[in-house]
Amino acid sequence: MEGTKIKIPARKKARIEIIPLIDVIFFLLATFVLFTLSLNRIMSLPVDLPVPAPPSSAPPDKDETVTIQVSADNSLFWNRDPMEMADLPSRITAYKSTQDAAGKEARILIAGDEKARFGATVEVLDEVRKAGIAKFSVETRTRPTGK
């Protein structure tokens, strides 16, 4: 008896088919081209840019901004002049009425020294808002007391 020989089929070499790959690439290319052509054009809004004006010969108005500084022991300074917290509402109201009479807008800068408490600063801010003053600023850096 002769041994039976088992035939093992020869392995096929792996091939990369380039034709289907090209078809897929062309399909994607056509899809993106058609998609970009179907987009609406971006509409822009006309913007009127400001035109520079020649400088005026009149001298600038004196800055009437009032600085209220809060100190560490809850004392206040009105333009470097010490004052009490109880006097603040009447002083702000008087300042606003004089500015309104002069036809100017009342402006206040709220500042604090290195050790000022947050609560006192909020009280000052509340009094400014109660008086109806719309233009106020809060200084973000500290300054020495009373300066």
Image: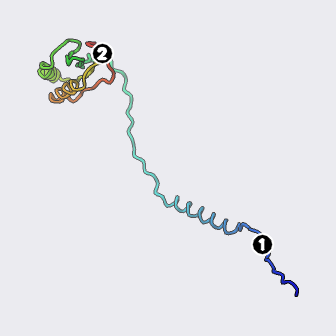
Q: Count residues near mark 2 (Cα–Cα under 10 Å), then give few for <14, some for 14-19, many for 20+.
A: few
Q: On the rendered structure, is 124 left or right of 113?
A: left
In the structure shown, which secondary structural element does the residue marked by tag 2 occupy? loop
Q: On the rendered structure, is 100 left or right of 135?
A: left
Residue, disc 2: 59
Q: Position of residue 26 (x, y in %)?
A: 63, 64
Given the image, on which type of amino acid does mark 1 rest?
Arg
By what rule are the colours in the image chosen? rainbow
Q: Quadrant of the N terminus?
A: bottom right
Q: Position of residue 104 (x, y in %)?
A: 20, 23
Looking at the rendered image, the disc whose residue lies closer to the viewer, 1 or 2, is: 1
Name the residue at 81% across, 80% down. 6
List the single residue furthest toward the right.
2
In the structure shown, which secondary structural element does the residue marked by tag 1 occupy? loop
Name the residue at 42% across, 48% down. 44
Residue, disc 1: 11
Q: Quadrant of the C terminus?
A: top left
Q: Is residue 134 above or below residue 59?
A: below
Q: Position of residue 23 (x, y in %)?
A: 65, 67
List the single residue furthest toward the front.
1
Are the two marked residues, 1 and 2, in contact with CB atoms closer than 8 angstroms?
no
Name the disc covering residue 102, or none: none
| 101, 88: nearer the viewer | 88
| 53, 125: nearer the viewer | 125
Q: Count residues near mark 1 (Cα–Cα under 10 Å), then give few for <14, some for 14-19, many for 20+.
A: few
Q: Is residue 5 visible?
A: yes
Q: Is residue 101 visible?
A: no
| 59, 79: nearer the viewer | 79
Given the image, on which type of amino acid does mark 2 rest?
Pro
Name the residue at 32% across, 17% down. 57
State which quadrant residue 99 falls in: top left
